[in-house]
Image (spheres, helix red, strand yellow):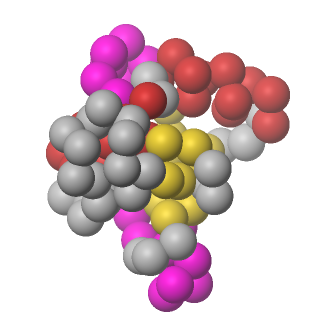
Amino acid sequence: MLELEVYGLASAKVIKCFTIDENDNRDLLKILRGAQLPIASSCFGEGNCKRCVICSEILSCQVKIKDLLQISKIYDTAPLRITVDYL
């Protein structure tokens, strides 16, 4: 299991903490929306609109759990913090 913490930069607070299965093959946009988080997107996950940006530069529609696992191993943090500018 991978522990995620979603932090809103606009509100300066933790919006939600939850865990996801490491074998989940969905992109992060779908996972965040499944967790009832209002992540913006108008291109249906094709990576064109760039509205689903997290952590200042990553398109959540283009990131899979396996990518997050590698990031969490590099930074060795638990939970892995995901920042969203407009939350």
- The residue range painted magenta reads 7-27
Q: Would residue 66 be counted in the magenta stretch?
A: no
- Can I make out residue 81 in this image? no
* 29 or 47, nearer to the observer: 47
The quarter in which the C terminus is drawn is bottom left
- Residue 36, given in percent of the width and then of the height, sits at 19, 58
Kindly identify the residue that appears in the image at 73 percent across and 42 percent down.
77
Does residue 85 sit above or below 82 in this rendering? Answer: below
The quarter in which the N terminus is drawn is top left
Which residue appears farthest toward the bottom when viewing the image?
A: 11
Q: Would residue 15 be counted in the magenta stretch?
A: yes
- Residue 66, given in percent of the width and then of the height, sits at 52, 16
Does residue 18 sit above or below 69 in this rendering? Answer: below
- Residue 22, given in percent of the width and then of the height, sits at 43, 19
Kindly identify the residue that appears in the image at 69 percent across and 30 percent down.
71
Kindly identify the residue that appears in the image at 57 percent across and 43 percent down.
58
* 79 or 26, nearer to the observer: 26
- Residue 35, given in percent of the width and then of the height, sits at 24, 51
For residue 86, which quarter of the picture? Answer: bottom left
* 51 or 18, nearer to the observer: 51
